[in-house]
Amino acid sequence: MQASVKWVEGLTFLGGSSSGHQIVMDGNAGDKAPSPMEMLLMAAGGCSAAEVVAILQKGRFTVENCEVKLTSTRREKPPRLFTRINLHFIVSGSGLTDKALARAVSLAVGKYCPVALMLGKGVTLTHSHEMGVT
């Protein structure tokens, strides 16, 4: 896997992935686009949500909706690292049980999502879940 980041102007950068996708990032607290730290938070949500959906589908559940709301705490002084991140999953689907959802979330965050696993080396990661309305 490879990527590139090119300066555009001010503190705006254009990131490019080896799969051919591009995204704008703004190092100025997200004035024009997500900041790199916001992107990292969204990456943890996207990665773990994909794993939750895959785990539930393998368990023969029909997932109708999956949303992750992430909340974080950062250090006050530079470098402003994340110190805590909570991933709260809201998932709905046919025949879905709280037990199955809890298992999927736990496996996704604690075993399968590489972004969460890497972040967990230096950040206190927690997760929670609720059954969404179908």
Image (cartoon, rainbow, N blue to C red):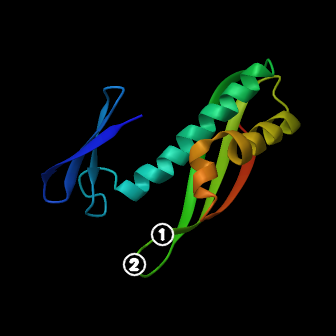
Give the amino acid at mark 1: Leu
Q: Which residue is mark 1?
A: 81
Is residue 132 rendered to the left or right of residue 46? right
Give the amino acid at mark 2: Pro
x 71%, y 31%: residue: 92
At mark 1, the secondary structure is: loop
Viewer-nearest residue: 107 or 122: 122
Which percent across, then down, holds residue 119?
Answer: 58, 56
Give the CA separation, mark 2 to mark 1: 8 Å
Which of the 4 quarters of the picture holds residue 65? Answer: top right
Which percent across, then down, holds residue 24?
Answer: 26, 44
Is residue 134 rendered to the left or right of residue 11? right
x 41%, y 50%: residue: 39
Is residue 72 rendered to the left or right of residue 60? left
Q: Which residue is mark 2?
A: 78
At mark 2, the secondary structure is: loop
Which percent across, then down, holds residue 45?
Answer: 56, 45
Which of the 4 quarters of the picture holds residue 46? Answer: top right
Q: How many residues crowd around disc 1 within 10 Å: few (fewer than 14), some, or many (20 or more)?
A: some
